[in-house]
Amino acid sequence: MEEFWAGVFWAMKIWLIMIISLIMIPAMFGFSLGISETYMTILMKTLKWATQKIQKANAEERAANNSPSNGLILRENGSMEKELGELRRSRPKPPVGGDFTLSDCFYFIRRGIESIVEDEVTQRFTSEELVSWNLLTRTNNNFQYISLKLTLVYGLGIFVRYCILAPLRITLACIGLSWLVIGTTAVGFLPNWRIKFWLSEWVHIICYRICARGLSAAIQYHNRENKPKKGGICVANHTSPIDVVILCNDGGYAMVGQVHGGLMGVLQRAMVRSCPHVWFERSEMKDRHLVTKRLKDHVSDKTKLPILIFPEGTCVNNTSVMMFKKGSFEIGGTIYPVAIKYDPKFGDAFWNSSKYSMVSYLLRMMTSWALVCNVWYLPAMHQQEGEDAVQFANRVKSAIAHQGGLVDLQWDGGLKRAKVKDTFKEQQQKKYSSMVVGDDSSSNSD
Amino acid sequence: MGSRASTLLREEEIEEIKKETGFSHSQITRLYSRFTSLDKGENGTLREDQVNFRGFMRTLAHFRPVEDNEKNKNPPTTEPLNSRTNKLLFAFRLYDLDRDDKISRDELLQVLRMMVGVNISDEQLGSIADRTIQEADQNGDNCISFQEFMKVLEKVDVEQKMSIRFLH
């Protein structure tokens, strides 16, 4: 019995030493031993092979359907005027009273059913559907048995991901987070010499690098000459809390957010000891002027790190960019837009907060293949003459969407939880009314 | 999302829906995913009217294009849900709020009010409703029956206007 425990202890020691030397030290100093690159190459080859096999097996089905898109239906987006005009073609226009026919309702019925089956917005709050299966159980929509080899690879994948990779990643994440707390608290004790800033940045970057290895993240940064500078505001599209880890791997940022309890609270309090972040109490968040003032103060101090803000206000599934809230664009600093795009083949990074808690989300991340993403730094933008905050926000949003290959939507991310405003319905009713009674405004009395 | 949803829908049910509506297997599973994502309360039905998945599919089946029926290997013995008559019946039932097989003046007014909101006065809406009934009514009962409804719309390309192209 004793020997068994001694053996387990020895194995754990070896395990930890291996992790520290092979993964942590390179991560801390920013170079790579090539282990993760080899893993990624093997992974990509395997997925490509699996895709080919699946596609060959489905070849007959594909030929019959020939539908390149992932959608449920093909919408015909004719305008209300055009569609109603066609519907009314079959009867002559009445001379007086108003132009209504019983067939008018067909337009609304069809549009309504189309929206019920598939709309632009609600699909952004669930994980993206993959074009072809990536050998993970969770993305399995239409599994049909194809070949023994494929099932074996799938089974091997499960073993590798759950028994080898997951414990490894969890260990790394724990080490990274505890290092963050310890390191920042320690740096916090130093007086405000120059070395404090340097040390604090170093501590932050190391721990984010360890966390990134803990997720098997393969990040590609583009256009690093446009990296956000001190005293600016960094603006990015939001897919999950991991966005923070991704961006902070390449520089220090000051975070903005609500004060949380629990583990997050501990992290927040530790981080703020070594360098200024902007954490708000829940009650303070409601006071927009207070929020704007604090952010303005932070931005005007040119020694402080750039603020990181996600103007969408909520997590979206990385196929589109939703409405940017104008608050961040009223502060007046230089805006550095950043586009983040994850590759869904290797793992789904979207945090569906109504479906998964933070912990189960992180576990799902750690049992995916990997986290592959591209980060583009876009050139700085300023608010122009005669442009109000909303237009400026839309301009930045379009730039980010264009760079990341995402759909640029005008809809508010808050629709995840809230209902649509009645004004939209009223607009449609007004439009239809003008088609019924014509443009004769004198008869539009109520 | 996908795998968990399709295990709740049994194969026999999928076969039954296939026969009744004419949708393909993959269309049914994908629409089931959509149904579950709309069903926020997770009780198998949508909203106050309590539409369950079968009802949902039956409604959607009205909107399949008529040409798709040729792809069906086992055509149903009764009239398919997406025939011209059934499409018109669907629209008729949207006007006929109390399901008495007649569209009365009041029902027409209610539906008109839903479509135009507050932008048209009661009197004007009333005269529009009167005129519509007058044109359609043939047997003088001041209501529109389904036959009269079909007659008014006989020149309208219902097959195209009430069809949605479902993929896969």
Image (cartoon, rainbow, N blue to C red):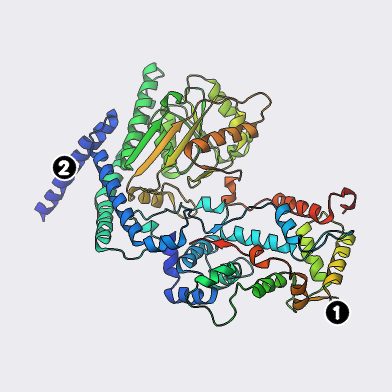
Chain of the residue displaying label 1: B
Q: Position of residue B5 (x, y in %)?
A: 45, 64
Q: Above or below — where is B13 with respect to A46?
A: below
Q: Above or below — where is A10 with respect to A162?
A: above
Q: Position of residue A203 (x, y in %)?
A: 34, 29
- From the viewer's perspective, is the residue at label 1 or at label 2 nearer? 1
Q: Above or below — where is B136 with respect to A195?
A: below
Front residue of A364 and A301: A364
Q: Is residue B162 left or right of residue A277?
A: right
Picture disc at residue A14 = 2
Label 2 Cα neighbours within 10 Å, binned few <14 / some 14-19 / many ≥20: few
Q: Is residue B40 visible from the viewing direction of this image?
A: no
Q: Position of residue A401 (x, y in %)?
A: 52, 38
Corner quadrant of residue B68: bottom right
Q: Is residue A247 visible from the viewing direction of this image?
A: yes
Q: Quadrant of the N terminus of chain A?
A: bottom left
Label 1 Cα neighbours within 10 Å, binned few <14 / some 14-19 / many ≥20: few
Q: Quadrant of the C terminus of chain A?
A: bottom right
Q: Is residue B8 left or right of residue A20?
A: right
Picture disc at residue B141 = 1
SS at badge 2: helix
Q: What residue is shown at x 58% (from left), y 38% (from top)?
A: A324
Front residue of B5 and A427: A427
Chain of the residue displaying label 2: A
Q: Mark 2 is on which residue type?
A: Ile
Which residue is outermost to the top? A194
Q: Mark 1 is on which residue type?
A: Asp
Q: Is residue A146 left or right of residue A275?
A: left
SS at badge 1: loop
As measured in the structure, the alpha-carbon distance from the residue carrying label 1 to the one carrying label 2 is 92 Å
